């Protein structure tokens, strides 16, 4: 059964052949229940099939992060342009007004910090009752494929999927990267597919070479993380390419809230995700908003 090299020779990705959908706009989700479809429709805009998420859950491992020192000041101005807020229950409850009407991707894995050499030993940090109480649109669980905590984090994922399926809450499986894990196409192909096969409804991963192989081989929607801050033009280029190559959304954090003008940056990303802007047009939009008096 074990065939570590299978991905090297794989070639039939059917790139460019759209996945057949029966009557629902989210890839691979035709056969889930009404409540789950309703939550997925809050995440993925039914008109474009895409989503723009804003990740600000960094504090769960990084503590006070540059750009997020004051969540109450940095996040509220960005809410209007995001479809989904990805945060911890602590950040959401303490700093975000519940009257805002956006989807919530609730960070539900926990148990590590940047002080640890090996961060792969996570646990489930939010139980299903609290996820329901928080009105989570999806529950985010980090998975460390190939690391010493692989089994434990896959266990977190499958347990959360079981609970999510029981109550109609989708699970967002997040592919972790770190010292022990490569950032190669081969690695992301492996990790995203494992997470999807175990039943996750959405996968978050990183943009990489041959990205369309990853989106083609993954039966559920992929959204990309941004990673460390890069110049705005580069972040917009990555977002554009990811969407062109089959991503159903963008879930950037540092490249938004650490941008010189976060509000302009989220609007520029939105123009790529939902309005068909190319990177040049999106950068022009960024600068025009940044330069507004
Ligand atoms: C990793 C995550 C974070 O939300 C994500 O990585 C943060 O976004 P960015 O990398 O764009 O700052 O899911 O656990």
Image (cartoon, rainbow, N blue to C red):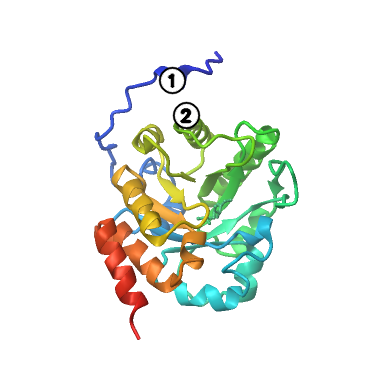
The quarter of the rendering in which ligand 1 is drawn is: bottom right
Kindly give the residue lying farthest to the front in the view shown.
231
Closer to the chain start, of discs 2 and 1, is: 1
- Say left or right for 40 vs 65: left
Q: How many marks?
A: 2
Q: Residue at x 52, y 15 (%)?
A: 3
* Alpha carbon separation for disc pair 2 and 1: 7 Å
Q: Position of residue 177 (x, y in %)?
A: 58, 42
Q: Residue at x 59, y 73 (%)?
A: 71
Kindly give the residue lying farthest to the bottom in the view shown.
293
Nearest the viewer among 211 and 38 is 211
Q: Can the viewer see residue 84 in this picture?
A: yes
Mark 1: give few (<14), some (14-19) or many (20+) Cα within 10 Å: few
Q: Position of residue 132 (x, y in %)?
A: 59, 60
Nearest the viewer among 228 and 137 is 228
Quarter of the image for residue 142 reads: top right
Mark 2: give few (<14), some (14-19) or many (20+) Cα within 10 Å: some
Label at residue 8: 1
Quarter of the image for residue 216 reads: top left
Query: In the rendered image of this protein, does residue 161 appear above or below residue 57?
Result: above
Q: Residue at x 45, y 22 (%)?
A: 7
Q: Tags 2 and 1 in contact by the CB under 8 Å rule?
A: yes
Q: Position of residue 199 (x, y in %)?
A: 51, 38
Check disc 1 and report its element: helix, strand or loop. Answer: helix
Q: Which residue is mark 2?
A: 186
Label at residue 105: none
Q: Position of residue 189 (x, y in %)?
A: 46, 32
């Amino acid at each position: 059964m074990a065939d570590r090299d299978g991905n090297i020779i794989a070639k039939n990705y059917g790139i460019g052949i759209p996945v057949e959908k029966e009557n629902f706009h989210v890839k691979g989700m035709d056969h889930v229940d009404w409540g789950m479809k309703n939550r997925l429709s809050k995440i993925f805009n039914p008109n474009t099939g895409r989503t723009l998420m804003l990740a600000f859950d960094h504090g769960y491992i990084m503590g006070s992060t540059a750009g997020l020192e004051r969540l109450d000041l940095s996040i509220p101005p960005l809410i209007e342009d995001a479809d989904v807020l990805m945060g911890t229950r602590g950040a959401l409850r303490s700093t975000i007004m519940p009257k805002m009407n956006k989807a919530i991707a609730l960070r539900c894995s926990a148990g590590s910090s940047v002080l640890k050499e090996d961060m792969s030993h996570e646990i489930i940090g939010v139980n299903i009752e609290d996820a329901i109480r928080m009105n989570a649109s999806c529950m985010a669980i980090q998975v460390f494929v190939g690391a010493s905590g692989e089994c434990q984090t896959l266990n977190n994922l499958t347990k959360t999927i079981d609970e999510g399926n029981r109550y109609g809450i989708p699970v967002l499986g997040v592919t972790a990267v770190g010292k022990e894990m490569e950032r190669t196409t081969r690695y992301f192909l492996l990790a995203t597919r494992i997470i999807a096969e175990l039943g996750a409804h959405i996968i978050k991963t990183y943009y990489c070479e041959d990205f369309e192989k990853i989106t083609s081989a993954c039966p559920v929607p992929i959204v990309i993380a941004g990673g460390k801050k890069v110049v705005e033009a580069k972040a917009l280029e990555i977002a554009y390419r990811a969407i062109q190559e089959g991503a159903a959304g963008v879930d950037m954090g540092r490249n938004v809230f650490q941008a010189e003008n976060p509000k302009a940056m989220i609007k520029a990303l939105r123009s790529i995700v939902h309005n068909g802007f190319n990177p040049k047009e999106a950068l022009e939009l960024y600068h025009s908003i940044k330069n507004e008096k």
